[in-house]
Image (spheres, rainbow, N blue to C red):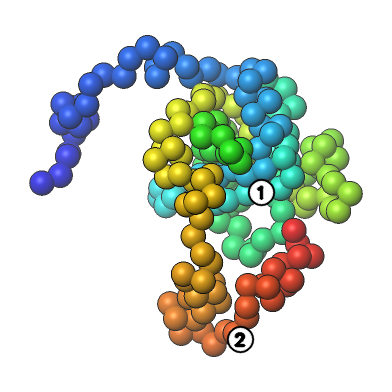
């Protein structure tokens, strides 16, 4: 038996109250901007026209994403696997959802908005580092922003050192992909993978 309507769904839950509803704002205030400045990691959610969804991790030094004003966020594109799922989706629909995390913080910051792919010299310059200038920048026009409560990360114990999982519990990513696809991939240790990735970090 599955839930088919919003009415059926809402019968299972109490109506949201108080700050759960009121906390959403339509701009980046000082607290959002400070959160973004401390964050080294975000998850970027996008969709294409047929509503095929994608969620992609993005990382860098704290503050690699730039809140340049109350309505605008810049996310530099870093070297990756060149699938370009997120970037192609942005071309299709121009919509993004973003979840910012800060190590050690159980609260997260959620941002929704419209997005475009910018090669404007000013945007590239703002997102350039000593190591590289991005090929392009995801320019987000903020439509909604709100701080998300700590419950999910508290339940997961994500930042608890005692909850860390030994990497040896799973094979290397190369071995897992080989098993999943049948591709012949040369064996590679975690240390060898880290060395291979180093130029793109």
User: What is the C-alpha distance between the residues marked 2 and 1?
Assistant: 27 Å
Identify the mark nearer the N-term, 2 or 1: 1
Q: Secondary structure at mark 2?
A: loop
Residue, x 51% and y 34% (percent of image)?
Answer: 106
In this rendering, the answer to whether 6 lies above or below 155 is above
The outermost residue toward the front is 162
Q: Is residue 8 left or right of residue 104?
A: left
Query: CB under 8 Å between callouts 2 and 1?
Result: no
Q: Secondary structure at mark 1?
A: strand
Report crowding for label 1: few under 14, some 14 to 19, many 20 or more residues within 10 A (C-alpha). Answer: some
Residue, x 63% and y 34% (percent of image)?
Answer: 140
The residue indicated by pointer 1 is 59
The residue indicated by pointer 2 is 186
User: Toward the viewer: 177 or 86?
Assistant: 177
Q: Is residue 165 left or right of residue 4?
A: right
User: Toward the viewer: 148 or 71?
Assistant: 148
Q: Position of residue 132 (x, y in %)?
A: 84, 53
User: Toward the viewer: 102 or 77?
Assistant: 102
């Amino acid at each position: 038996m599955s839930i088919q309507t919003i009415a059926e769904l809402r019968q299972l839950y109490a109506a949201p109250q108080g700050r759960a509803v009121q906390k959403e704002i339509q701009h980046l205030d000082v607290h959002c901007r400070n959160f973004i400045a401390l964050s080294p990691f975000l998850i970027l959610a996008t969709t294409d026209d047929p509503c095929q969804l994608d969620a992609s991790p993005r990382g860098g030094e704290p503050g690699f994403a730039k809140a340049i004003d109350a309505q605008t966020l810049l996310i530099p594109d870093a070297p990756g696997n060149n699938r370009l799922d997120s970037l192609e989706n942005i071309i299709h629909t121009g919509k993004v959802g973003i979840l910012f995390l800060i190590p050690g913080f159980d609260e997260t910051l959620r941002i929704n908005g419209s997005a475009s792919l910018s090669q404007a010299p000013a945007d590239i310059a703002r997102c350039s580092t000593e190591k590289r200038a991005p090929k392009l920048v995801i320019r987000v026009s903020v439509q909604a922003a709100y701080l998300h409560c700590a419950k999910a990360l508290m339940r997961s114990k994500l930042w608890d050192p005692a909850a860390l999982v030994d990497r040896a519990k799973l094979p290397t990513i190369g071995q897992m992909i080989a098993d999943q696809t049948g591709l012949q991939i040369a064996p590679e240790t975690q240390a060898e993978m880290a060395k291979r990735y180093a130029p793109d970090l």
